[in-house]
Image (spheres, rainbow, N blue to C red):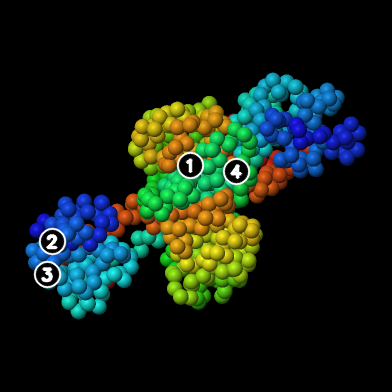
């Protein structure tokens, strides 16, 4: 809230912009989304005027990954649409929205390219030891210890993509020219996709050297990457997670890495962010990133266009740009 | 073939040694204390030499081995093998061509991604326990950035192919325009640098390409531009690069090579907008093993009187 002052105009609505509830936890605030003020009069539940304007507001904008649960929706009785602003929307209670007949929009493809780029970056980093080798040079070890140990080649690797949505597709497209063999698992087999489909993550892991997690976090994908899946990839297996931390049984992953029973990991997400298992801090076969796969000025600009487009469409009764499939 | 003597000049790959040991009577030259006695005793049995880019087969070695039939080199370059003398003596020579291209191109893309998306800095930030104190800054998107390639040979072409999958428009500079290439050609490096956001050095090091990245090129690339060097250190005027990075006249750099390896300019260690690698472009286990397999394949072909796989002489 520190950076956000509600515009005075809310009481007079002299700018004629519609009112929208801005739903957020303290770490997400309007300073990262200043353009929201161009399209709506924002108000949040802590605002003294909320009791006047909040109950009639038709739209709620969820900033970042702020959780939106049933009890929040109880406070927003007139809401017809929830506008998400992040790559995943597991923090929004979709079942509850559906029950209340509230539409939900996501970020569409705004973040997809950045997320896919990041997955390839983490995979290349783990295989070729980019971050560990950079550390070696910065610690002035090159002149002392000589040649850095050999890394592994990306070409020829069998890469399994878990979740072949827009991000997963873009990961596949990017990895093709490196000479990787690509397979995937997804809720449904996709038609006209050249990659081999496996119906379970375990089957996919069995035929993969590396798994890249691009799926949403749902009840079905929670801890779907467990010990059995990880060991199915073998001692040289690599895991890249740009989805959500809880897709992986993190304790088991850490245990296998500590025991030397798993090859390496590139992680942008964790089960209890910003907590990262300390055991990983000393490993050269892991790359650790603070949930940043999508945060570039370029993707924020794309997000702005999607959010503004959805709000404009909603308030003028036109088709939404990126409505989340209500069966999700 | 256990009776055939093979002389290995230098320890280059433990996998190679293992595989040679399995098939041949292997002599390790670096373990030999008295060379003259060694040759007197074993020269008649040694029919093959396996060398590399550091220790090949010069005239002296060839003359010490009267039974020598083949030099199978664990390298692309053969400047340490006396090719003319081998030809004269009827000694066959093979190398391991084309095996490094993919590794180097992969690392070039890895460096672009790591530099723009600040992966190494992210990793330092998490390991340093800083995440709990606040949020990390934004990084720069890679997909769609204009990539300019200096030298459109095998490696340059492989980089272009990979960058295209990230929707990056590709342009290049080389001594002459490649009529078969669909990429945009610039006749000078300065023009290429002015037109792209990521400039990558992928040409051989020659007198003409020494310091091909100078102050003028760096200024043309500008404060939003990134330099990637997977070629050789002397391609870049390192003093100019360091001052541009320190003064913020260049957005960042991803460097696998340096002018005075293994020395890296001290000023770079404190910068977060650079990725510094210890010349690992061509080093992967898979590639080294493939090279070893090719060395052995050539020896086996020769001694079973089949055509050589990658003959040079």
| Residue lying at 55% horizontally and 35% vertically, measured from the top left | B129
Quadrant (top left/top right/bottom left/bottom right) for the N terminus of chain A: top right
Tags 2 and 4 on a common chain: no
> For numbered disc 3, what is the local secondary structure?
loop
Whole-Å distance between the Cαs marked 3 and 1? Answer: 52 Å
Residue bearing mark 2 = B5
| Residue lying at 61% horizontally and 61% vertically, measured from the top left | B244
Chain hosting mark 2? B
Quadrant (top left/top right/bottom left/bottom right) for the C terminus of chain A: top right
| Residue lying at 19% horizontally and 60% vertically, measured from the top left | B29
> For numbered disc 2, what is the local secondary structure?
strand
Residue bearing mark 3 = B67
Q: In the picture shown, does residue B234 fall above or below A140?
A: below
Q: In the picture shown, does residue B307 fall above or below A251?
A: below
Going from N to C along the chain, the mark reached first, 4 or 1, is: 1
Going from N to C along the chain, the mark reached first, 2 or 3, is: 2
Q: In the picture shown, does residue A81 fall above or below B21?
A: above
Whole-Å distance between the Cαs marked 2 and 4? Answer: 58 Å
């Amino acid at each position: 809230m520190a950076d956000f002052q509600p515009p005075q105009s809310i009481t007079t609505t002299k700018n004629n912009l519609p009112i929208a509830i801005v739903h957020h936890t303290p770490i997400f605030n309007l300073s990262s989304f200043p353009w929201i003020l161009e399209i709506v009069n924002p108000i949040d539940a802590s605002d003294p005027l909320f009791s006047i304007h909040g109950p009639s507001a038709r739209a709620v904008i969820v900033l970042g990954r702020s959780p939106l649960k049933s009890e929040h929706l109880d406070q927003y009785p007139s809401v017809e649409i929830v506008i998400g602003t992040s790559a995943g929307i597991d923090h929004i209670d979709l079942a509850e929205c559906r029950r209340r007949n509230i539409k939900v929009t996501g970020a569409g493809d705004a973040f997809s390219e950045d997320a896919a780029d990041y997955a390839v970056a983490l995979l290349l980093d783990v295989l070729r030891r980019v971050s560990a080798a950079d550390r070696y040079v910065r610690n002035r070890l090159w002149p002392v210890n000589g040649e850095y140990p050999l890394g592994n080649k990306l070409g020829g690797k069998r890469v399994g993509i878990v979740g072949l949505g827009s991000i997963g597709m873009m990961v596949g497209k990017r990895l093709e020219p490196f000479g990787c063999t690509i397979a995937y698992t997804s809720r449904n087999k996709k038609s006209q996709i050249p990659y081999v489909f496996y119906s379970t993550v375990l089957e996919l892991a069995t035929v993969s050297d590396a798994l890249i997690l691009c799926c949403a976090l749902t009840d079905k994908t929670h801890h779907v990457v467990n010990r059995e899946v990880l060991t199915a990839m073998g001692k040289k297996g690599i895991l890249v997670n740009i989805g959500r931390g809880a897709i992986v049984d993190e304790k088991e992953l850490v245990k296998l890495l500590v025991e030397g029973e798993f090859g390496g990991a590139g992680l942008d997400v964790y089960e209890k962010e910003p907590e990262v298992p300390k055991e990983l801090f000393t490993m050269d076969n892991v790359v650790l990133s603070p949930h940043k796969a999508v945060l570039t000025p370029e993707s924020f600009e794309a997000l702005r266009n999607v959010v503004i487009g959805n709000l404009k469409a909603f308030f003028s009764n036109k088709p939404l740009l990126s409505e989340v499939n209500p069966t999700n | 073939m256990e009776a055939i003597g093979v002389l290995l000049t230098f320890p280059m790959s433990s996998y190679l040694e293992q595989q040679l040991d399995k098939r041949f009577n292997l002599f390790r030259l670096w373990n030999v204390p008295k060379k003259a006695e060694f040759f007197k005793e074993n020269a008649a049995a040694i029919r093959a030499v396996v060398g590399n880019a550091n220790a090949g087969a010069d005239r002296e070695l060839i003359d010490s081995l009267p039974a020598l039939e083949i030099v199978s080199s664990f390298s692309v370059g053969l400047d340490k093998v006396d090719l003319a003398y081998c030809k004269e003596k009827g000694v066959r020579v093979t190398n391991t061509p084309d095996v490094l291209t993919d590794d180097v191109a992969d690392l070039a893309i890895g460096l672009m991604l790591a530099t723009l998306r600040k992966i190494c800095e992210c990793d330092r930030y998490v390991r340093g326990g800083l995440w709990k104190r606040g949020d990390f800054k934004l990084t720069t998107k890679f997909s769609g950035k204009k990539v300019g390639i200096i030298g459109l040979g095998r490696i340059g072409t492989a980089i272009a192919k990979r960058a295209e999958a990230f929707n990056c428009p590709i342009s290049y500079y080389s001594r002459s325009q490649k009529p078969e290439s669909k990429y945009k050609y610039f006749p000078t490096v300065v023009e290429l640098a002015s037109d792209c956001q990521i400039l990558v050095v992928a040409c051989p090091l020659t007198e003409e390409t020494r310091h091909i990245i100078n102050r003028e090129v760096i200024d043309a690339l500008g404060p939003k531009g990134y330099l990637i060097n997977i070629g050789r250190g002397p391609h870049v005027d390192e003093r100019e690069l360091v001052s541009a990075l320190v003064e913020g006249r260049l957005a960042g750099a991803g460097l696998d090579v340096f002018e005075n390896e293994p020395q890296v300019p001290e000023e770079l260690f404190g910068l977060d907008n650079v990725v510094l690698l210890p010349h690992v472009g061509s080093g992967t286990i898979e590639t080294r093993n493939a090279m070893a397999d090719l060395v052995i394949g050539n020896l086996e072909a020769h001694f079973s009187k089949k055509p050589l796989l990658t003959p040079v002489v």
